[in-house]
Image (spheres, rainbow, N blue to C red):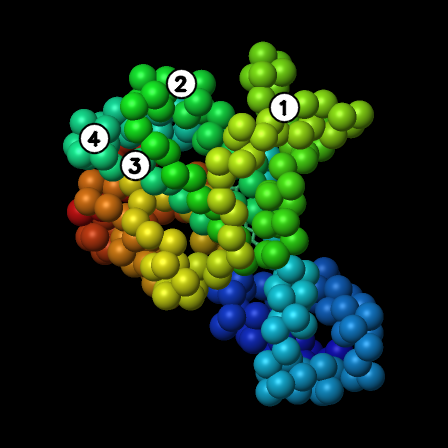
Amino acid sequence: MNDFDLIKLRDFIAAKTGIFIDDDKLLKIYKRKFEDFIQKQGFEDFESFYHHLVFRKDEYLLQELINLSTVNETYFFREEYQFKTLVEEVVPELDSLRSSRDSINILTAPSSSGEELYSIAIYIMEYTKEFFAKRDFVLIGIDIDSMMIKKARNGVFNQRSISKIPPHLLQKYFIQDGKQYRIIDEIRKGLTFKVVNVMDFYAMKKLGKFDAIFSRNMLIYFDEKTRKEILATYHALLKSHGYLFLGHAEKVPEEMEIFKRVKKGESIIYQKA
Ligand SMILES: C[S@@+](CC[C@H](N)C(=O)[O-])C[C@H]1O[C@@H](n2cnc3c(N)ncnc32)[C@H](O)[C@@H]1O
């Protein structure tokens, strides 16, 4: 692939997914990945591949290309202080504001292979017993990467992924199978994972309304304009007084007054204004 082809493909991926691959990574990591991919998919050259992708709108090819382009790093109890804030501050506050019939709905966008949403489920079961006993919790995870969603639904994790879970919780919520750890069915079956692109506003709207949205470690890969569009989508999906949790390197720009920045426990989070 020449530089022109590489940039064309990079821009196509950014327009579809929001993921912007910088020049350095494009040349050092992705060039080779893309060339191997095009060859493996049976195309003779970049032109025929690109034509198929863009003009024939081959959905399978697009999904495979997206799966190749994402960075899926995640693990259980990552930035754990935010889960503490959720159960100690946010859930009790929203419980007092909502009608007794309402469920507490939580979205992780993106969920990658599910560790974040499963961590939230463990935290809720473990530390919100009084609320958990009296109302439903709806937990949904979405990601654009279909392989990650498959892995999340499967609920089987390796040693690296579970290394931050305290031993007593690991024993309580997982079944060890050799070097693998399977989350117990009681949790796995209660969660929903779906392939959804956060840039697809209508697909996002269909997910429903949420009390809390966790969007951690994805917006850093997006440009500023796209970031603002996605933050506006989260705002539309949050119920009144709902909260947005971002990764430690991410923030809502000050000029976006649709969110109020608040400190709760050890976390800086954003409340729907
Ligand atoms: C680094 S992981 C973060 C996972 C998890 N939130 C965490 O903090 O551990 C980033 C994820 O964002 C997903 N992603 C990237 N662009 C997306 C998009 N447009 N819609 C939904 N998910 C996307 C990727 O597939 C990847 O799994």
What residue lies at 49% left-to-right and 39% top-to-bottom?
191
Query: Which numbered disc covers residue 103?
Result: 3
Query: Which residue matches tag 4?
Result: 100
User: Circles 3 and 4: CB distance less than 8 Å?
Assistant: no
Tell me if residue 176 comes above or below residue 146 in the rendering: above
What residue lies at 34% left-to-right and 59% top-to-bottom?
205
Q: Closest to the observer: 269 or 213? A: 213
Q: Amino acid at mark 2?
A: Tyr
Label 2 and label 1: CA atoms lie apart by 17 Å
Q: Nearer the viewer, mark 2 or mark 3?
A: 3
Q: Amino acid at mark 4?
A: Ser
Q: Nearer the viewer, mark 4 or mark 2?
A: 4
Label 3 and label 4: CA atoms lie apart by 8 Å
Q: Going by the image, does 254 lie left or right of 24?
A: left
SS at badge 1:
strand
Picture coordinates of residue 86, whole percent (x, y): 35, 29
Query: Which numbered disc covers residue 174?
Result: 1
Beta carbon of the mark 1 residue lies under 8 A of ligand 1: no
Label 4 and label 1: CA atoms lie apart by 31 Å
Tell me if residue 2 comes above or below residue 71 in the rendering: below
Q: Nearer the viewer, mark 4 or mark 1?
A: 4
Residue 2 appears in which quarter of the rendering?
bottom right
Q: Amino acid at mark 3?
A: Ser
Tell me if residue 207 comes above or below residue 41 in the rendering: above
